[in-house]
Amino acid sequence: MSGPRRCRLARGPGPAALPTPESFLPCAVIPTYDNGMAVARVVEAVARHMDHIIVVDDGSAKATRDVVADLQRQGLAIAVYRQRNGGKGAAVKTGLAEARA
């Protein structure tokens, strides 16, 4: 993982599970698979509205990994997780699990 702070999401159902405003840190989860230019546009657009972004690389080729690494070098707070290709749903689950960790 890279980035200055972890995202925090609510755990479980119901109002008792909601985080307090002091502990809540919203983030975006963006799955990607071999679409480097599209993920660059999405991350840049989301970064205008949100400080913490999780990108889950679902087994992409090197070109997509390089694009995400370039975004990190630009100073964007992007946490990047890589996994074997399991599909968009699996990538979103990974991102949400990391956000809750």
Image (cartoon, rainbow, N blue to C red):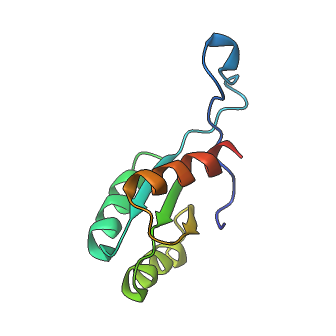
Closest to the observer: 86 or 93?
86
**Residue under the image location 28 percent in, 74 percent down:** 37
Up-down relation of residue 84 to residue 96 (above or below): below
Closest to the observer: 49 or 56?
56
**Residue under the image location 38 percent in, 65 percent down:** 32
Residue 28: x and y in percent read 47, 47
Q: Residue furthest front?
A: 86
Quadrant, the N terminus: bottom right
Closest to the observer: 67 or 34?
34
- The image shows a total of numbered marks equal to 0
Residue 77: x and y in percent read 56, 61
**Residue under the image location 60 percent in, 19 percent down:** 13
Q: Is residue 51 visible?
A: no
Q: Is residue 68 visible?
A: yes
In the image, taking residue 51 as reference, residue 39 lies left or right, namely: left
**Residue under the image location 56 percent in, 46 percent down:** 96
Residue 85 found in image quarter:
bottom left
Residue 54: x and y in percent read 53, 56
Up-down relation of residue 58 to residue 50 (above or below): below
In the image, taking residue 73 as reference, residue 43 lies left or right, namely: left
